[in-house]
Image (cartoon, helix red, strand yellow):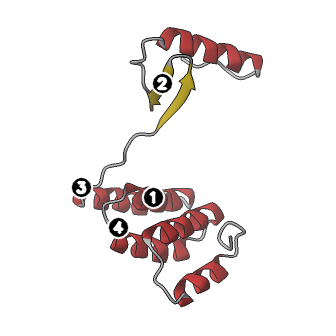
Amino acid sequence: MFGHAGLLNQAYGLLSEMPIEANSVVWRTFLAACLLHGDANLAKIAARKVIDLEPEHCGSYVLMSNVYGTLGQNEEVSDVRLNMRQQNVKKTPGCSWIEFGDGVHVFGTGDRAHPDEDSIYSELNSLYMSMGLCHMT
């Protein structure tokens, strides 16, 4: 809650003084809060902790890359991505799913393979137009 509220120093103090060691999920949550509030210094500390605890998890690298990207530190973004390649860590593509009618329909990022693709994108375009937004292609 401290991190979400922007009280990053208090959150870090709590993490550092807990009687049990924080796990990778806790550190990744703190890292996300650092991204949200733009604190690169604490983000680096959190990233080191979470990468030590769970080096194969892509989320930590992506969050740190986003911290650097937000701050315009493009060389550091490149370093994080290089580190991911060296560690053979791959980001899994995003996906969404919806339960509709006869079952669950799954869509990956940029997915154009769904059998009802034309109907889906036509409906999305209609929704965008009714909201006054440009249409999707």
Which three-letter amino acid code belongs to the residue tagged 3? Asn
Secondary structure under tag 4 reads loop
Q: Is residue 126 left or right of residue 113?
A: right
Q: Crowdedness of circle 3 by 10 Å Cα count: few (<14), some, many (20+)?
A: few
Residue 53 coordinates in the image, percent (x, y): 36, 73
Q: Report which residue position mark 3 lands on.
A: 88
Q: Which residue is nearer to you in this view: 70 or 92? A: 92
Residue at 64% of width from left, 76% of height from top?
8
Which three-letter amino acid code belongs to the residue tagged 1? Ser
Mark pair 1, 2: CA separation: 31 Å
Q: Give the mark nearer the N terminus: 1 vs 3.
A: 1
Instruction: Look at discs 1 and 3 and give the one toward the viewer.
Output: 3
Q: Which residue is nearer to you in this view: 70 or 60? A: 60
Q: Report which residue position mark 2 lands on.
A: 105
The answer to whether the residue labelled 1 contacts the one labelled 4, judged by CB atoms less than 8 Å apart, is no
Q: Give the mark nearer the N terminus: 3 vs 4.
A: 4
Q: Report which residue position mark 1 lands on.
A: 65
Residue 61 coordinates in the image, percent (x, y): 40, 60
The answer to whether the residue labelled 3 contacts the one labelled 2, judged by CB atoms less than 8 Å apart, is no
Secondary structure under tag 1 reads helix
Q: Which residue is nearer to you in this view: 128 or 57? A: 57
Q: Give the mark nearer the N terminus: 4 vs 2.
A: 4
Q: Report which residue position mark 4 lands on.
A: 54
Which three-letter amino acid code belongs to the residue tagged 4? Glu
Secondary structure under tag 2 reads strand
Residue at 31% of width from left, 50% of height from top?
90
Instruction: Look at discs 3 and 2 and give the one toward the viewer.
Output: 2
Q: Give the mark nearer the N terminus: 3 vs 2.
A: 3
Mark pair 3, 2: CA separation: 30 Å
